[in-house]
Amino acid sequence: MYATMKQSWFSNLKGDTLAGIVVALALIPEAIAFSIIAGVDPKIGLYASFSMAVIIAFAGGRPGMISAATGAMALLMVTLVKEHGLQYLLAATLLTGVLQILAGYLRLADLMRFVSRSVVTGFVNALAILIFMAQLPELTGVTWHVYAMTAAGLAIIYGFPYLPKIGKSIPSPLVCILVLTAVYLLTGMEIRTVGDMGELPDTLPVFLWPQVPLTLETLMIILPYSIMLTVVGLLESMMTATIVDDLTDTPSDKNRECKGQGLANIGTGLLGGMAGCAMIGQSVINIKSGGRTRLSTLIAGVVLLLMVVFLADWVSQIPMAALVAVMIMVSIGTFSWSSIKDLKKHPMSTNMVMLATVAVTVGTHNLAIGVFVGVLLAAMNFANKVGNILYVGVETPQEGQRTYRVVGQVFFASSERFAKAFDFKEAVERVTIDLSRAHFWDITAVQALDRIVIKFRREGSEVELLGLNEASATIVDRYAVHDDPEAVEKLMGGH
């Protein structure tokens, strides 16, 4: 147990500490911005980011991943806050946590295996584009000082690692923030700072039970929002966990992550924060800055709270250009540049899934819709490909007999092709259908077999089915009706 705890918490002290500080600095403006999107006070987002990070550090299933207030979740809260107020948002956050814990126990994270690699790539690319687009308001209608500071920040981020000795020991995003803040304080140039984003809290969060009536009416108000928050939160968290798995070449427990997200949202709701989930941008910052264990996530949350409460005067002086440079670095690092080269090598269907996921996600700013469209297209492509792998051979052993040998998968996408492979025009005495190399998957396939058998019998042929495997025989025996006269009449419309 001691060895496991040491590996999970204290195997990378320096890297986790420095990475946690970088993440904490980058979380502040985003938490404030997401609070504004949701229509609540900035401290709601900051408290949420603190509590989410701290709780998930202990309860989550993916070490090194950062959870906090996010834009995807904030967008879902706007109407609830506008129509019912903050207290109902806190209640919805608590219910979201309960639903996420339930999802963990139901092992819904296992559904991630149905998300193809092309969908994940599209999700990553779309998120990189959205992260970059989110920085554009800070780069439009501004003076040249902002562009100069942003360019200098990017030069530091990408150039500092090449310095001998110290280049690899200190995260370059942290150096960028410290240097640009010093430049701003020394020159006093007219540029936006973190303090211009909103007022930072001056007290620690306290326990708050939502002040809403405990009635069925309240439940009906918050339930639709909680369901949406649950789905989007878990989807973004599972996708982010997959990406961090790839970046670190280590596995994660995604069902535990579901439960951890639930516990974190319950804790957040009780501390006056808005619902949150895993953040791909901050998680990438953490990994790129050297964070690997749970300690980096814990430090990010604790340092965030300490800075906004006790060092607010200093934190408010950080120029937004420094944080914009860090987020541009994140968007560049997040985007899968190899996917552009792979467009020439990969099949058109795979490319379409990836591009559709990107287009829908960027167009709607909704990660859940983008991933849903990608998964749907991938499933349709798969069904189409498997449906085309079907062969029906015809043999005539002797006069008056015909044997059909079926090879492949028979289901809703291939059932029509299956039915058209049989010739009902020429009457024969005996028809044998060899299904030993075929598999029936659904009721649509069974109904197609029913119609084939019935049509042959109406032409006066004796029909024999051979070689059904156990699984196919089970579904055919349960749902086939070709041996039931009344059902046959009903199926064929009485003709």
Image (cartoon, grey):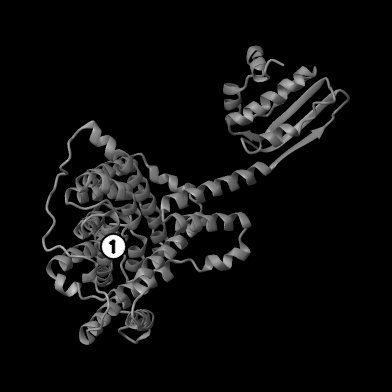
Q: Nearer the viewer, residue 447 or 390?
A: 447
Instruction: Answer with left or right where residue 432 lies relative to residue 113.
Output: right
Instruction: Answer with left or right where residue 231 lies relative to residue 263.
Output: right
Instruction: Answer with left or right where residue 491 lies relative to residue 312.
Output: right
Q: Where is residue 291 in the image (x, y as percent from the top left)?
A: 30, 67
Quarter of the image holding residue 9? bottom left
Q: In which quarter of the image is the C terminus?
A: top right
Depicted 432 relative to depicted 49: above or below? above
Instruction: Answer with left or right where residue 247 lies relative to residue 35.
Output: right
Q: Where is residue 155 in the image (x, y as percent from the top left)?
A: 37, 82
Q: Residue at x 25, y 85 (%)?
A: 183
Quarter of the image holding residue 202? bottom left
Q: Where is residue 378 in the image (x, y as percent from the top left)?
A: 55, 49
Q: Nearer the viewer, residue 485 or 45?
A: 45
Q: In which quarter of the image is the N terminus?
A: bottom left
Disc 1 secondary structure class: helix
Observer able to see residue 254: no
The residue at the far right in this view is 399
The residue at the far top in this view is 486
Q: Nearer the viewer, residue 31 or 179?
A: 31
Q: Residues within 10 Å of mark 1 (few under 14, many from 20)?
A: many
Depicted 137 relative to depicted 473: above or below? below
Q: Which residue is drawn at 20% across and 76% down?
A: 317
Q: Residue at x 82, y 32 (%)?
A: 395
Q: Where is residue 328 in the image (x, y as percent from the top left)?
A: 38, 72
Amino acid at the residue labelled 1 = Ala
Observer able to see residue 360: yes
Total numbered badges shown on the rendered structure: 1
Depicted 449 relative to depicted 105: above or below? above
Q: Mark 1 points at which residue?
A: 33
